[in-house]
Amino acid sequence: MKISLQINASPYQHQAADSAWHFIQAAILSGHEVYRVFFYHDGIFNALRDARPPGDERDIVKRWSDLNAKHGVDLVVCVSSAQRRGLLEQTVAKKLGGYQAALADGFRIAGLGLLMEAIIEADRHITFGA
Amino acid sequence: MKISLQINASPYQHQAADSAWHFIQAAILSGHEVYRVFFYHDGIFNALRDARPPGDERDIVKRWSDLNAKHGVDLVVCVSSAQRRGLLEQTVAKKLGGYQAALADGFRIAGLGLLMEAIIEADRHITFGA
Amino acid sequence: MQEFLDIVLMAAAFDQRVVLVFEGDGIYALMKDQQAEVLDLKDNSLIFKALSIYDINDVAVEKESMQARAIKTDQLLIPVVATPRHELKQRLQSADQVFSL
Amino acid sequence: MQEFLDIVLMAAAFDQRVVLVFEGDGIYALMKDQQAEVLDLKDNSLIFKALSIYDINDVAVEKESMQARAIKTDQLLIPVVATPRHELKQRLQSADQVFSL
Amino acid sequence: MLYIINKNPSQNLALKNCVDQAIAGDVILLIESAVYAVINAAQSTLLQSLDDQVSVYALIPDLQARGIALDQCYRGVNVVDYAGFVGLVTEHQPVRSCF
Amino acid sequence: MLYIINKNPSQNLALKNCVDQAIAGDVILLIESAVYAVINAAQSTLLQSLDDQVSVYALIPDLQARGIALDQCYRGVNVVDYAGFVGLVTEHQPVRSCF
């Protein structure tokens, strides 16, 4: 089955990013396809390349990057949520070498259309939030 | 009276930053001193220099900057909350010209000690959260 | 709310059949005379009024929630159908996708 | 929780008199046998066990909340005093500063 | 003690927990979505159960932003603007934000 | 319909609202802090009021992380691990996250 997910909450302050990640691990193990993870609202803060949690804690951003590297899961950050919150104003992003330098490895930036596509294409769309 | 504030929630998704800002306006008008605003937890996302809300909406980050410019209110972003969430990893901050380039005008970065100082020095400490 | 409505409008733009259901205190989102400007907040009532432009005409409020709050449909921003809980439940049940706010 | 405890420890480091009060479901934070590692979450029980190192020895749980949940003090991570609601309320009332989580 | 509550009482129990605890002389200030508590038809039973010696305030701009007219408010509720909010904070100690 | 609830029922009414709505054939899955609902002494009255035809599941790792032993759970509750969570999602349509 094709499953897509939506993450609406920031990492660490809420368990949403953890729950979604564990869910995805189990879904992949069960042979399902994770079609896309769409980061919306404060969920976009899951994509900040420079997050540095204390050494004895899980690195949530890196988990997402690894998920893309190992399983090719499509990680999409909503551009309007991101601009509103200051994740990637173009002028600064350019200094850093474009959007991809503000986002951690494996994430890409796109509009709400990709959320709709995920909802329509996938058999299930599951939201994790605050 | 000396009043300090603490903001624990991200802007836009919660009303905390709005409520605190209106509270501060009234406090200053009533002749009180706003000793410090301490941004903690997801509250640190109030300080992102590059937030670009849609043109027909309030610019929450700019409001804070203006508050510092006009009234000298001390705006302190918690360094451990910020590092955990990816606001200012040093190597990237350096590329941009140090911490101050990641933070909007008027904000400074510091440790929890400044929260304690605010709590001890101020007559009242008011928390706004999610 | 603003970003939730963005999803609603986008779904309509993708020719999805959209049904908006207001239940519990969600009904308050439709109250007339919301003065968002006193707090300089975003005024969502304009979006609600524009829903029909986006071909979203199916807006339901839960009858029981209206009654519990003593709200009449003429106190709301837009024309809505007050629908009993069990009927709403059936409509939700038949949806492919349910988003909650 | 982690960042809330950081405030608690910092207050103690600033020689403030710290009283930790657990009421309602807050009591569950002190339950023994929390296996944070199954979800790879931060294990806060170590911090609770280390409170006395930071000279935080005043930890109270609300008696009524314990009774409502049928929890006994020996099911908790650390020694606590089960205190009736009205006494806790008096202690909070006399505090300079109250932080809630 | 001044309690500040910001969550809608039909979705969150912060107000209920606070009503259970409040004693004579305490003040409860409702802001943001908590102001829905004052609507007569809805949650007034919660506020009715309060001791007479506990006062309840609602923040006017939050009422206005939500389209709640003052004559829809439960009669036991006082209203304040932000200057009044500041006044309550300066008059009471300690202040507890139940967020 | 599969309802997914993640909030503690003593602080938030999401579970209560869902219990009020659920009909025969529906499934309620409790994750994160919502698993506190299964503790016998606490909120079992809420779950008791459910139709027999509505099943309730709690996520095992969330129980374990909170120190809730399986023998503390209300008897009407089933438990699943993340693989079971995925199973519930694939078996039901639509899925409603009540966050």
Image (tube, coloured by chain):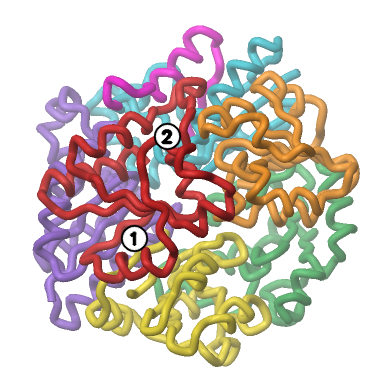
Chain colours: A purple, B cyan, C red, D green, E orange, F yellow
Can residue A109 be seen here? The reply is no
Task: Report the chain holding disc 1.
Answer: A
- What segment is highlighted magenta in the picture? B53-80
Task: Report the chain holding disc 2.
Answer: B
Residue F40 position within the rendered picture, expressed as x and y whole percent measured from the top left: 63, 84
Residue C62 position within the rendered picture, expressed as x and y whole percent measured from the top left: 44, 57
**Residue at left offset 14%, top offset 77%:** A32
Q: Does the magenta run of residues contain C75?
A: no
**Residue at left offset 24%, top offset 45%:** C57
> Which residue has dot 1 on it?
A128
Marks 1/2: CA distance?
A: 20 Å
Residue D42 position within the rendered picture, expressed as x and y whole percent measured from the top left: 47, 64
How many residues crowd around disc 1 within 10 Å: few (fewer than 14), some, or many (20 or more)? many
Specify whether F32 is left or right of E81: left
Can residue F80 be seen here? The reply is yes
The image quarter containing residue E29 is top right
Secondary structure beneath disc 1? Answer: strand
Q: Nearer the viewer, residue F39 or C100?
A: C100
